[in-house]
Image (cartoon, helix red, strand yellow):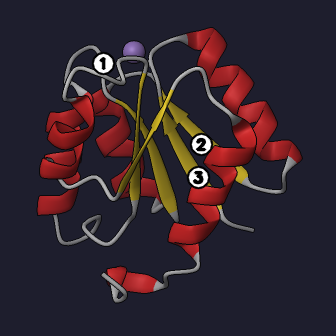
Amino acid sequence: MKRILIIEDNETNRDMLSRRLTRRGFETLVAADGAEGIATAAARRPDLILMDLSLPVLDGWAAARQLKRAPDTAAIPIIALTAHAMTGDRERAIEAGCDDYDTKPIDIERLTGKIQALLSRGPSGAAG
Ligand code: MN
């Protein structure tokens, strides 16, 4: 079973996303801020991370940079999530090392497609 870490400070969004992914056959882990997310990723080694960008303690861009800089977590694909589609968040997320990007409100079919695409890419992002 593939393990997905959801880093999201909004409890309602976090719980809903976790339930929907669980129903689709994923194991989910959750974290409520960027620092907790980094610690959970290092300890539990998820197969993929869903990263809200607007987070307390450490925002999603900074957390993504740290994860991609650390050898233990660098290969874990990250999908950035934001409600602000038009503010340059996407470009900044990719610059920070995120592998893909999606917008809220979440379209679960679209997001699951992006998750599957990254999971099927294999370890270390070999396909680019
Ligand atoms: Mn947020």
Q: Which residue is drawn at 14% across and 47% down?
A: 96
Q: Judge: label 2 CB < 8 Å from ligand 1.
A: no
The kind of secondary structure element at disc 1 is loop
Quadrant of res 107: top right
Q: Judge: label 1 CB < 8 Å from ligand 1.
A: yes
The crowding category of the residue bearing disc 1, from other C-alpha atoms within 10 Å (few below 14, some 14 to 19, many at least 20), is many
The crowding category of the residue bearing disc 2, from other C-alpha atoms within 10 Å (few below 14, some 14 to 19, many at least 20), is some
Q: What type is the residue that disc 3 sits on?
A: Ile
Q: Which residue is drawn at 75% across and 68% down?
A: 1
The kind of secondary structure element at disc 3 is strand
Mark 2 — residue? 29
- Name the mark on residue 4: 3
Q: Which residue is drawn at 55% across and 34% down?
A: 30
Disc number lying in front (2 or 1)? 1
Q: What type is the residue that disc 2 sits on?
A: Leu
In space, the residues marked 2 and 1 are separated at their CA atoms by: 19 Å
Is residue 73 placed above or below 38 in the rendered structure? below
Horizontal arrangement in the rendering, residue 7 relative to residue 108 (left or right): left
Q: Do the residues labelled 3 and 2 touch (CB within 8 Å)?
A: yes
- Name the mark on residue 24: none
Disc number lying in front (3 or 2)? 3
Residue in the foreground of this view, choosing between 67 and 80 = 80
Q: What type is the residue that disc 1 sits on?
A: Ser
The crowding category of the residue bearing disc 3, from other C-alpha atoms within 10 Å (few below 14, some 14 to 19, many at least 20), is many
Q: Which of marks 3 and 2 is nearer the N terminus?
A: 3
In space, the residues marked 3 and 1 are separated at their CA atoms by: 19 Å
